[in-house]
Amino acid sequence: MDTLLLRKYDVPVPRYTSYPTVPYWDSTPGEVAWKNKVKASFDQDDGISLYIHLPYCEKLCTYCGCNKHITKNHQVEAPYIDTLIQEWSMYLALFDQPPTLKELHLGGGTPTFFSPEELERLITSITRQAVVPDDASFSFEAHPSSTTFEHLETLYRIGFRRISIGVQDFSPIILEIINRQQTEEQVEMVTQQARALGYDSINFDLIFGLPLQDKSAIRSTIKKVERMRPDRIAFYSYAHVPWIKPSQRAYSEKDLPLGEEKRALYELGRQLLEEAGYAEIGMDHFALPEDDLYQSYQAGTLHRNFMGYTPHTTRLSIGLGASAISDSWDGFVQNEKKIADYKARVERGEFPFFRGHSLTTEDENIRQHILNLMCRHETDWAHPSQQSNALFAGIERMEELEKDGLISLAPNRLKVTQKGLPFIRNICQPLDARYWDKRPEGALFSQAV
């Protein structure tokens, strides 16, 4: 990578898991308005996505930026599941017919903190009141040290075919400094057991930029990944935001690879993964050619939502649980982050969100262009419906990006060059009208590279 470009563009920018990004949500819909948005979105599509947030963990992984609650008290499981089921029933009451579940994902926290019996009770309570098509994608996040054969067997029996294993890195030294207690043997055992049961898509989550991580650690990790051969890999950049996640102060910034050193870890990892037969997809994701994520990328149908990259596109994504985010396409809401507040709201029969955003027509326009760049590395605006003042203002901000060879502009069309792929977040930022209208005075985002 060009060192000068890296230095120039390694600045704080949003990750664009949504547009507008959460810091710029400024028009939370009321409960009646949210119900109407959900109903309208449901009526316009033939399926929904469902995300369920299971926030409990037995131990704190200090690098983690997720919303979690640390406890060894498993008595919390049943009451939390009860609340999730009650929240789901509130959404069901809005629909004229059972929803079709195109995808369902269990995230956390640590979903396998919950017993197989409680997870089965949750999922069967949801699916008995829904339609589950043959091509539905049910997936869950698995911590290698807490995922038992019983978890795998139970979830497979009730429809799960995808598993995402939180590996991060295989180095015992790195795992120790981030307080991630697992072993290579546990990762391999979960992988082998899942394959033996019939899971058809296994993902490994890896992170580059962790404390004490260097090129030798990346080489060692990728070598072990190649041997275990997961179908997909998410190779995320570590987001160091200690002002938001104080647990990240457990180590010093002197321990972190930064800037050019950090990006070199990604470039090495990408090279090794491509040599092993994986193809880069979207941003920070890789898949084998036979995986449906790769196939949807090739077909131009790849989609991105709060759960990550997916072959399934739905207008309505419902998030259940503390801190979960729901998306009606023209609106977002986020649930209460504190478990006690979330439960109290649901028990009162209220939709438990505390903030959100109603998208304007201009927001929707920019959202689609950013989504196109994130999923296809190009976008166009030949049709008047694809145009807006915010889009044209954003294109005018891209002069420097074009001069540096990161993008190619043609009439009514923008393409990201091969040189520009590492800077995809920087390329989206000029289109971010909300950001430019109210640029942050303090630190909000992680570094671009």
Image (tube, rainbow, N blue to C red):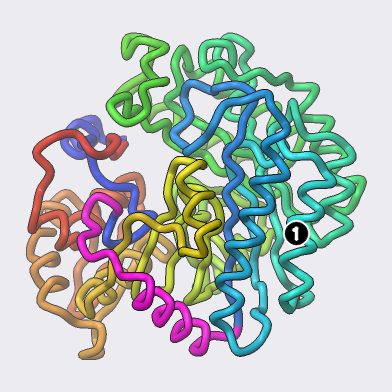
Left or right? Give the position of 398 relative to 331.
left
Q: Residue at x 87, y 50 (%)?
A: 154
Q: What residue is pinned by disc 1?
A: 123
Q: Position of residue 348 (x, y in %)?
A: 50, 59
In this picture, which residue range is highlighted in magenta? 22-46
Local SS, label 1: helix
For the view shown, which residue lies furthest in the front direction?
A: 348
| Magenta highlight: main SS | helix
The residue that appears at 57% across and 49% down in the rendered structure is 53
What's the residue at 45%, 58% (across, down)? 352
Identify whether 67 is placed above or below 16: above
Q: Is residue 28 magenta?
A: yes
**Where does residue 60 sit, x and y in percent of width and height?**
55, 22
Residue placed most toward the observer, 371 or 260: 371
Residue 77 placement, left or right of 437: right
- Amino acid type, residue under disc 1 in the picture: Ile
